[in-house]
Amino acid sequence: MKDELLLLRNIKDGDQVSFKVFFKATYPALFGYVNSYARNRVLAEDITQQTYIKFWEHREKIDIDNSPKSYLYTIAYNSFLDSKKREQKERSYIDQLHRAAIEEETNEKEKLELKLERLQKVIESLPEKCKKILIMNKMEGLKYKEIADRLDISVKTVESQMRIAFQKIRESFKNEEIILWMLFGRLSGCSL
């Protein structure tokens, strides 16, 4: 008891050697106490370390007459509660980010679907020959020469019809040209 009081007085005065002795003597019991709440060895080790750091940083508050170990355990318990609050805030923040990402993804998908519908309407409004040539090229992947051979028309006619199709599509989408190419990639799975 007398040795413990001397040890605590020395800690209060900033003696690191006394603190190390105190640490070694109290660590196993304090760790067990924290682990009984945390039920996670890594978390318990972190909280126990934080407890000793706070104990050292606030050593001037140690009341030698009123069980310093009680003070140590109070710091440990409060550190555990703080870690739980932090964990809940982090989990809440992650949940919010997840919901926002899903909402954003849903909004983007809906926007893309609307543009795809708009593109399909523009393609449907094309003259029949123009529409057929566009579909053969963009959805079936045929080259202009292959289209010309299949439809028994000249390659120049295919080029002309494709130019008309693209012009009508560009007019409909104006400044959204990059999106057009993305949509054409998606069209291969759609039926017109």
Image (tube, helix red, strand yellow):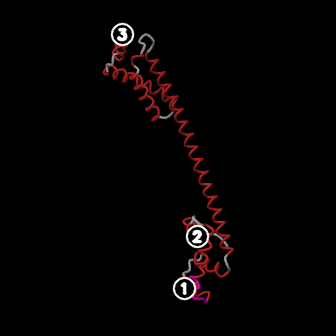
**Marks 3 and 2: in contact by CB < 8 Å?**
no
* Element assignment for label 1: helix
**Marks 1 and 2: in contact by CB < 8 Å?**
no
The residue beneath circle 1 is 145
* Kind of residue at disc 1: Lys
Q: Can you tell which of label 3 and label 1 is closer to the viewer?
A: 1
Looking at the figure, which quarter contains the C terminus? Answer: bottom right
Residue 17 x/y as whole percent: 30, 21
* Element assignment for label 3: helix
Range shown magenta: 152-159
The residue beneath circle 2 is 184
Which is nearer the eye, 192 or 95? 192
The residue beneath circle 3 is 2
Which is nearer the eye, 8 or 97? 97
Q: Report the Cα–Cα distance between label 3 and label 1.
A: 102 Å
Residue 3 x/y as whole percent: 34, 12
Number of residues whose C-alpha sits closer than 10 Å to that of mark 3, classed few (under 14), some (14–19) or many (20 or more) = few
Q: Earlier in the sequence, mark 2 or mark 1?
A: 1
**Marks 1 and 3: in contact by CB < 8 Å?**
no
* Kind of residue at disc 3: Lys
* Element assignment for label 2: helix
Place residue 45 in its image quadrant: top left
Q: Earlier in the sequence, mark 2 or mark 3?
A: 3
Q: Is residue 73 magenta?
A: no
Number of residues whose C-alpha sits closer than 10 Å to that of mark 2, classed few (under 14), some (14–19) or many (20 or more) = some
